Amino acid sequence: MNRFVYYIFRFLIAWFAITPFFILYVISDISYLIVFFLIGYRKKVVYENLKSSFPDKEDSEIRRIRRRFFRHLCDISIETIKGFSLSKKQLKKRYTVLNPEITLPYFEQNKPVICLASHYNNWEYGILALGPALSHQAVSIYMKLSNPYMEDFGTRIRARFGMKMLAVNDTREYFSQHHEKPLAIILAADQSPSNVDKLIWTQFLGKETACLHGPEAYAKKMNAPLIYFAVKKIKRGYYSLNLELLHENPSETAFGEITSLYMQRLEKDIITRPEHWLWSHRRWKHRKEDIEANPAHK
């Protein structure tokens, strides 16, 4: 079954490679109608996440944002598959890294940086574009796939422009090695943690929210400056990335401060264009009172 899924996926990539974007966006529009109206994929989850995050908005506005989100989700889904066959020139045209020079002083000091990404706009294009844009060795940390064929193909294709794909279970060994260039470690840390024993709690979109501990742990251990990835959708299929310095000396921060800085900055982007964030994820499945009441997590 794993091999069958892989071959189907490779066929899709080959077909998308020869199909122009304007036709793919027609497919995206049709997919939206199927996903939203016929299948109803996670419509309730998206509605509940939006309603709890924007309690002051009218129900009609919540439903309007939800429709826009599903249109956007279908777009980035087809863009992701198309992205597997884009050339470096095509990618640079569609995903512009505005100010990579912000990391140059740290590169010259041979210092690593921690880059905080999120599931906002097209994150897959960011993985492809950052390898050649940064002077640092860009390293994207990810969770391994259970399908070994998809895992091997996905890591190879995402690394073709210079990105190093690093499975989260391999980080300790990799970071302990000597590297020719300092690292730019890229973490998309805005989703719900799977390990409830290492949560960091902070206020996010008006709710007490469980957050991944990784960015804070890496940043403090390495004392690596924190860079936030602010991604904007210019128009359909076109994005820009602005790098913003969040904090230069993480070792001087109090516990939870880094996580709070990151989530507050992401919150600003979400409030500006809420339809561009991944609302279909069950972001608030952990409740602080439930975890604190469980003796196993005390």
Image (cartoon, helix red, strand yellow):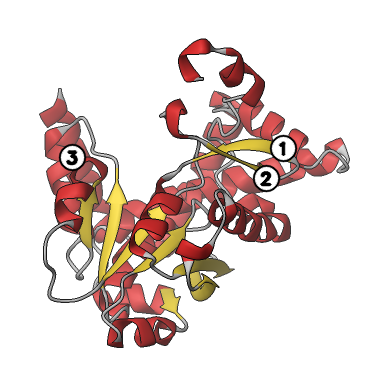
The three-letter code of the residue at mark 2 reads Phe
Mark 1 nearby-residue class (10 Å; few <14, some 14–19, many ≥20)? few
Q: Distance between the residues labelled 3 and 1?
A: 36 Å
Q: Name the residue under label 1.
A: 207
Describe residue 234's horizontal placement relative to residue 161 as left or right. Answer: right
Name the secondary structure under disc 2: strand
Q: Please give the label number shown on residue 150.
A: 3
The three-letter code of the residue at mark 1 reads Lys
Image mark count: 3
Q: Which of 114 and 4 is in front in this view?
A: 114
Residue pictured at 30% horizontal, 76% vertical = 111
Mark 2 nearby-residue class (10 Å; few <14, some 14–19, many ≥20)? some
Residue pictured at 32% horizontal, 79% vertical = 133
Q: Are marks 2 and 3 in contact (CB under 8 Å)?
A: no
Closer to us: mark 3 or mark 1?
Answer: 1
Asked if 285 appears above or below 253 in the picture, the reply is above
Residue 134 position, x and y percent, is 31, 78
Q: How far apart are marks 2 and 3 (CA)?
A: 34 Å
Q: Mark 2 points at which residue?
A: 204
Residue pictured at 35% horizontal, 81% vertical = 106
Name the secondary structure under disc 3: helix
The three-letter code of the residue at mark 3 reads Met
Describe residue 162's horizontal placement relative to residue 228 as left or right. Answer: left
Residue 3, quarter of picture: top left
Q: Do the residues labelled 1 and 2 touch (CB within 8 Å)?
A: yes
Q: Which of 246 and 14 is in front in this view?
A: 246
